Each structure stands twice: as C-alpha cells, then as structure tokens.
Image: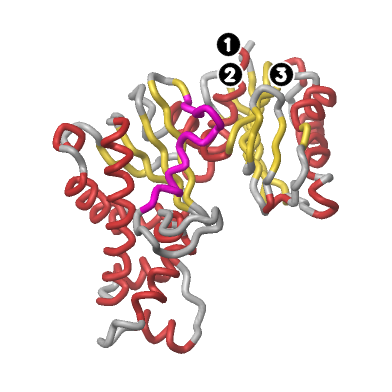
C-alpha cells in the first residue's frame, strides 16, 4: 500500500492543499479561499472540513495517510505547532494549529514557516533535488527564504535563519515593514520593483511607456515592468537592471556565507525568467568570492505554485521519520 501525505500551503488569500505519496508524487490538489474574518478563527476549521470532504468525495481514506505538513506565514513554534503574528491572516494571538488538526484528523502534524516549506519542496522534487546544500529565495509580495544545509533546514536560534528579504542592500534606503531601512524586500519583491520604478522615474528624461504610466497614475505592476523591459523600453530595462543589482548583491552575500550548490529563485517575480536571471547572475558573479562564484549556481525554481504543498508533504515525512 502506498503511504500518503497531506500538504497544506496556507496563504493570505488562498490555501492550497494536496494529497501526495511518500515519494512526492501529487495525487490530488485543490485550493480554498482563506477566510480571515473573525480574527482568522475559521481558517483551521475550514482546512479540516475541506480535507474531510475531499476524502469523502474521492477514494482516499484517513487510514491511507501517515502525516500532515503545513507551511504558514507568521512566527512559528515548531515544537508546539503554534503560530503568532501572521497579520495577513488576522492572527494576532497564538494559534494552536497542531492541537486542532491532530485532534480532528488523528494524524501526526508538522508546521513550519511558508518560505522554509517551499524551499523543502524545491529541495525534494524541484531545482535543488540533486544537492544537499541549497538556498531558496522567494520573490513575491515580500521576499522570503529558506536555507538547507546537509539536507536539513536551518532555523537559527530564534527562527530567523533564511530571512534573506531583510539583508540590507541599500543602507539608509527605503523603509521596510520590519522597521529597518534598505532591506532587499523593498527592492526585489513585486511591490519593491514598482517602488524602484517610481523612485527612478523622477530622473529619467527619455521616451518610455513605463515613465508615461507612472506620470499618468496608471497601475504599474512588476509584471508590467518586466514585460516592457522585454519589449525594449529603455527605462524599464534600467529598473530591471537596478532590481537585479540589489538581488545579485544580496545573493552574493548569501553565497559568500554558505557556498551552497544552488541558490534557487522562486515566487511570482521569478516568472520573468531569464530577464531576471541573467542580470542577477551577472551581479552575483561580480560580488561573489571567486571560489563561490565558480561553484554556486543561480537557478530558477521549477515547481511554481506546487512548491508549498510538496514541501509540506516533505515536512510531514521528515516529522514521521525523525
């Protein structure tokens, strides 16, 4: 009998779920809306109900499963299975997720930070699957990260390992939501790309569709910036170059500290592909110590939106096997 796992990727707007084999094959996947009303009290019950209903509607039985893993925003206590400070979920107080899910479903449950869990997914079945030392960077609404050393997630003494989004790339620069200034997150996230574009537009005097959009108050997204850069907009290319400079600099610092086999870039901004990868790699190589430059590679993630649920399955398996 195939041993099965349940993976949960909890997000601020959508929660992705999957049934997987213990070798990482996705058997079934689906998504539900994350209901953050009433201080997020409905989130975990909705997840439990969705899993139960999915089993009823398919040929899966609870006895087929050996564990559940979940990635979540916020500050995680892995031992207790609790989360606090996930403000986009309205979780301002400590949430006892492990107790609720284990009591309802009767399966061992493991919890970790969402960026760590996504990195486990890429490590297990994606761009880092052939290596034992991998750093994962996710460029989305914010910038997250996960560090895997000798096949194990690094958490640090207070869970702060892998906070790549808060590497300072511009001392005294844009103010970050963390209270610091000049964090990578303010320059290379989806919102950061737009912030860089608006900041640089004041000095640009040539012809540019991107500049026109900013001046006229049209909505600008990171996707638009990369699209215009791909289509020859000079100013958009300057913005992309600046973003990639900051990202390459931060990744060189990560490389110089850890010298992993691969640094894997994922998240929505990574959909820009080579338009992002090539200049980032150039700036990484300019700023990396030569032995690091010659051995650590910058790669794009392979699993897309499935990284979280696959990583959550991996987390469940590690929890059972530890």
Residue at 40% across, 52% down? 270
Q: Main secondary structure of the magenta part?
A: loop
Residue at mark 3: 108
**Relative image position of residue 235 (x, y in whole percent):** 29, 76
Q: If the image is split into quadrants, where does the N terminus sit?
A: top right
Labels 2 and 1 touching (C-beta < 8 A) = yes
Residue at 55% across, 38% down? 308
Magenta stretch contains residue 136: no
The mark found on residue 317 in the picture is 2
Label whose residue precedes the other's in the sequence (2 or 3): 3
Is the residue marked by circle 2 packed among few (<14), some (14-19), or many (20+) residues within 10 Å?
A: many
Q: Which residues are magenta?
A: 153-168
Label whose residue precedes the other's in the sequence (3 or 1): 3
Residue at mark 1: 321
**Relative image position of residue 286 (x, y in whole percent):** 17, 49
* SS label for mark 2: helix
Residue at 27% across, 57% down? 245
Distance between the alpha carbons at the discs numbered 2 and 1: 6 Å
The mark found on residue 126 in the picture is none
């Amino acid at each position: 009998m195939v041993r099965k796992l349940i993976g949960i990727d909890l997000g601020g707007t959508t929660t992705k779920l999957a049934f997987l084999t213990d070798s990482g094959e996705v058997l079934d996947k689906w998504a539900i809306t994350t209901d953050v009303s009433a201080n997020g009290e409905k989130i975990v019950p909705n997840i439990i109900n969705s899993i139960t209903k999915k089993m009823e509607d398919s040929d899966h039985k609870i006895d087929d499963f050996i564990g559940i893993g979940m990635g979540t925003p916020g500050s995680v206590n892995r031992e207790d299975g609790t989360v606090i400070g996930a403000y986009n979920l309205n979780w301002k107080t400590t949430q006892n997720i492990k107790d609720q899910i284990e009591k309802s479903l009767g399966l061992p449950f493991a919890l970790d930070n969402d960026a760590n869990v996504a990195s486990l997914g890429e490590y297990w079945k994606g761009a880092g699957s052939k290596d034992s030392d991998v750093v994962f960077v996710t460029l989305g609404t914010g910038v997250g990260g996960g560090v895997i050393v000798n096949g194990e997630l690094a958490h640090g003494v207070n869970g702060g390992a892998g906070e790549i989004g808060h590497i300072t790339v511009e001392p005294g620069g844009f103010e970050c939501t963390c209270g610091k200034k000049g964090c990578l997150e303010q320059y290379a996230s989806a919102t950061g790309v737009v912030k860089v574009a608006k900041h640089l537009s004041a000095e640009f005097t040539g012809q540019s569709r991107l500049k026109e959009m900013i001046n006229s108050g049209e909505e600008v997204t990171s996707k638009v910036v990369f699209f215009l850069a791909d289509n020859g907009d000079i100013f958009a290319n300057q913005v992309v170059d600046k973003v990639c400079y900051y990202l390459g600099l931060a990744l060189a610092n990560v490389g110089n500290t850890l010298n992993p086999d691969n640094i894997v870039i994922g998240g929505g901004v990574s959909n820009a592909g080579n338009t992002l990868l090539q200049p980032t790699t150039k700036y990484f190589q300019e700023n990396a110590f030569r032995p690091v430059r010659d051995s650590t590679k910058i790669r794009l993630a392979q699993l897309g939106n499935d990284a979280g649920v696959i990583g959550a399955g991996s987390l469940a398996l590690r929890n059972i096997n530890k």
